[in-house]
Image (cartoon, rainbow, N blue to C red):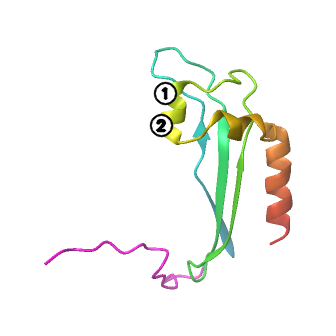
C-alpha cells in the first residue's frame, strides 16, 4: 500500500482555539548566494507571499515579485541553479524598496 502525502492547504480544518488574527502572511524568500565562503551580503531576489485565512486555513491570495539585487546584480551560476531564478527575471524586477511598496499595496487590498 502506497502512502500518499496530502497537501495540508488542500484539506484545511478550523483551529481548535479562537485566533487573535484574521489572516496570516506566509513568506518564503529567495536570496543571492554562492557556494564559495564569505559571500555577502545576501540580498532578497524573490518575495513570494501566501495570504491565509486564520479561521479556516484557506488560501485567500498569493503575491510574488522578483527583486533586483544591488550589491551583487549578476546572479552566480550556483544561485540560478539552486533557486531556478534567471538573470532576466531579476534584471527586470523592482528594487527592494519598490517590491516592499508593491507588497504593502497588495496587503492593503485585503
| Quadrant in which the C terminus is drawn | bottom right
* x and y, in percent, of residue 63 in the image: 71, 60
Magenta stretch contains residue 97: no
Q: Is residue 46 visible?
A: yes
Residue 14 falls inside the magenta stretch:
yes
Of helix, strand and loop, which one carries label 1? helix
Left of 22 or right of it: where is 1?
left
Counting from the top left corner in percent of width and height, residue 52 is at 62, 72
> Which quarter of the picture shows residue 57?
bottom right
Residue at figure coordinates x 42%, y 72% from the top left: 7
| Vertical order, 4 against 44 (above or below) | below
Residue at x-position 45% and y-position 22%: 35
What's the mark number on residue 44? none
Please give the name of the residue rendered at 58% of the width and 79% of the height, measured from the top-left corner.
Answer: 58
Q: Residues within 10 Å of mark 1 (few under 14, many from 20)?
A: some
* Residue shown at 85% from the left, 69% from the top: 109
Q: Which residues are magenta?
A: 1-18
- For residue 73, which quarter of the picture? top right
User: In the rendered image, which residue does mark 2 sit on?
Assistant: 82
Amino acid at each position: 500500500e502506497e502512502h500518499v502525502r496530502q497537501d495540508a492547504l488542500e484539506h484545511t480544518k478550523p483551529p481548535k482555539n479562537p485566533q487573535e488574527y484574521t489572516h496570516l502572511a506566509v513568506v518564503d524568500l529567495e536570496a543571492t548566494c554562492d557556494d564559495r565562503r564569505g559571500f555577502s551580503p545576501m540580498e532578497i531576489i524573490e518575495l513570494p507571499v501566501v495570504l491565509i485565512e486564520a479561521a479556516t486555513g484557506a488560501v485567500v491570495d498569493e503575491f510574488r515579485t522578483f527583486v533586483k539585487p544591488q550589491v551583487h546584480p549578476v546572479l552566480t551560476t550556483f544561485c540560478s541553479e539552486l533557486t531556478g531564478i534567471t538573470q532576466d527575471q531579476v534584471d527586470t524586477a523592482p528594487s527592494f524598496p519598490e517590491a516592499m511598496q508593491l507588497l504593502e499595496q497588495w496587503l492593503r487590498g485585503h
